[in-house]
Image: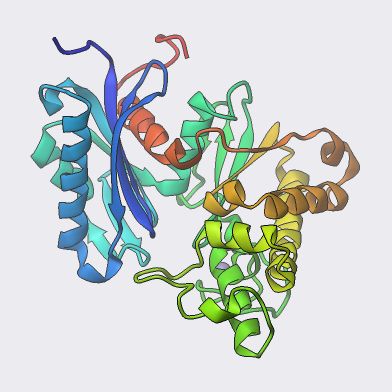
Amino acid sequence: MAKQKTCALGIDLGGTKTLAAVVDLTTGEVLSSARKRTRANRGQDFVSQRTIELSNAAIEAANLTSPEELVAIGVGAAGQIDRENGVVLDAPNLGVHNLALGTILNKNFGRPVFVGNDVEVAAMGECLFGSGRGYENFVCVFVGTGIGSGIVQNGKMYTGFTGTAGEVGHMTIQAGGRICGCGSRGCLEAYASRTAITKAVLAEIHHGRSSILTDDALGLLKEGDTIIRSGIIANAIQQNDELVIEVVKDAADYLGYGIASVMNFYNPDAVILGGGVIEAVDLLFDTAVHRARNAALSASAQKTPILRTRLGDFSGVVGAAALGAMAAGYNFAAAGK
Ligand SMILES: [Zn+2]
């Protein structure tokens, strides 16, 4: 007998991995999930097909008799999104341009589909079921390939005039500094993202600096990776590797200044930090919090909680499922959330 649960499908389409999950909307629990590496170099038909394949796997593993049981489907994609039409406009990390993912998934599964930004959906996941519960106004900052943030205002996502609010990764923190992927210079993510940490470690090794990672400098980036895995960074720090500790502390300092600027400008009820490297590397989190508290103006510096995400890897799929359900008319307030 099929369990009667109110579920939605959440899809997290990130630069590193694609994750699909069936989520119980009353508890935020992930009932089943399926993941594979995102292969941006294979073109966008591959991206859509893999998304469908992983969705089917998650639906099957949740023992749903048919996709009809899903309230809706929600997607968070790492790129610029046309939310109204469900189109991924531009997503260089996914190798996708003008992809009508909403239409494709709707045709395949016959359910309403909402497509949003990856950071936006992750922030919503934390808002409803994670560290953001109990806070009306907060900012989630995610450190990964880049640095993005989601702004929750009065319990709802604030996306801004052109839908692009929260680009903390492109706040200028160093005039005339390192060149950033956006074409500008001195952006936060050129200093504190996992990409920046990777570049700094590899550059130092290349210049002859010794590190326990030296022997494995080429093996550090496994096939398809553009960034050193969080586990490798955490392990090097545990083994007291001077180079990695120095690079991570530097990155954390910049991240802390960025967070302090967010606190000064927005005075949120809380700041929530997420992303694999934040979860795995205590030194990064602790140093960034310390720096943020030192650099922010005193009232907010002392009082504002700075937390880690609670849902970890699942923030995105849970939030995507929730936003999908909301867009389809599901009311979390009426359901007791
Ligand atoms: Zn930039």
- The residue depicted at 51 percent of the width and 67 percent of the height is 228
Identify the residue at horizontal 45%, vertical 75% (top origin): 219
Q: Quadrant of residue 96?
A: bottom left
At horizontal 77% and vertical 35% (from top left) the residue drawn is 304
161 vs 22, left or right, is right
Q: Can residue 227 be seen at all in this image of the molecule? A: yes
Q: Residue furthest right?
A: 298
Quarter of the figure with residue 212: bottom right
157 vs 89, left or right, is right
Viewer-proximal residue among 221 and 211:
211
Q: Quadrant of ligand 1?
A: bottom right
- Pinpoint residue 192: horizontal percent, then vertical percent: 64, 64
Q: Is residue 24 above or below residue 119?
A: above
Where residue 282 sits in the image (x, y, percent)?
A: 68, 49
Q: Nearer the viewer, residue 151 or 202?
A: 202
Q: Is residue 43 above or below residue 297?
A: below
In the rendered image, residue 335, in percent from the top left (x then y), is placed at 40, 10
Q: Above or below — where is 60 with respect to 14?
A: above
Picture quadrant where residue 54 is located: top left
Q: Where residue 95 appears, x then y in whole percent?
A: 29, 67
Q: What's the image's color scheme?
A: rainbow
Q: Residue at x 30, y 21 (%)?
A: 329
